[in-house]
Amino acid sequence: MSMKLFFAHNAVAAETQEVVVSDRFRDESGRPAAWKLRAISEELNEELRSASMKRTKGKGGQAMPEMDYNAYLGRMVAACVVHPDLNDVELQQSYGVRGAAAVVRKMLLAGEFANLAAKVQEINGFDREVGELAEEVKND
């Protein structure tokens, strides 16, 4: 097998996917509006994880780093939403919040956010295990 298969120009680009997140947002025709989602690189994912770390007191009063999973999930969802533009100032102002992660949480009901987060994780490959991928290779 050639190493060239793994070169950047040979990698299949991740496509944006359209998902109806909520039936509360409707287009001009009255149909539920689709949101556009994209996958992110592990490089960006690492930045999101790092930005979501907080310090907590451990044994002996020492500060210990700990992942704030809720902050991470909000950042990840916000990074993957292409449309609507969660960074739009007018959108944020309409909900009385600042920041993409804050506005998406304010826009959606709890179940809608959970479904969106699950779809974001799926698009980014978190729903597949290495064993599943190996089985696909064997079956081809």
Image (cartoon, grey):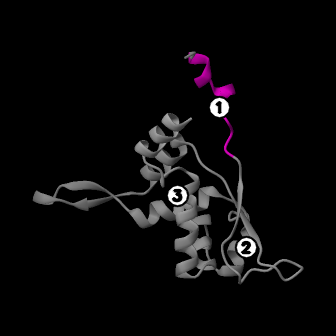
Q: Secondary structure at mark 2?
A: helix
Q: Which quadrant of the figure has residue 84?
A: bottom right
Above-or-below relation of 30 to 90: below
Amino acid type, label 1: Ala
Crowd tier of the residue under label 2, counting other residues whose Cα lies within 10 Å: few below 14, some 14–19, many 20 or above: some
Front-most of residues 77 and 55? 77
> Which of the two marks, 3 or 2, is nearer to us in this view?
3
Residue pictured at 10% horizontal, 58% vertical: 60
Expressed as whole percent of the image width and height from the top left, the position of residue 72 reads 46, 60
Quadrant containing the C terminus in the rendered view:
top right
Q: Is residue 57 left or right of residue 128?
A: left
The circle on residue 11 is 1
Expressed as whole percent of the image width and height from the top left, the position of residue 67 reads 35, 58
Above-or-below relation of 25 to 45: below
**Mark 2 highlights which residue?**
91
Amino acid type, label 3: Gln
| Magenta-colored span | 3-14
The mark nearer the N terminus, 1 or 3, is 1
Front-most of residues 20 and 60? 20
**Mark 3 highlights which residue?**
121
Q: Secondary structure at mark 3?
A: helix
Q: Is residue 116 left or right of residue 22?
A: left
In magenta segment, residue 38: no
Q: Which quadrant of the figure has residue 65?
A: bottom left
Crowd tier of the residue under label 3, counting other residues whose Cα lies within 10 Å: few below 14, some 14–19, many 20 or above: some
The mark nearer the N terminus, 3 or 2, is 2
Determine contact: label 1, label 3, CB under 8 Å: no
Expressed as whole percent of the image width and height from the top left, the position of residue 71 reads 45, 64
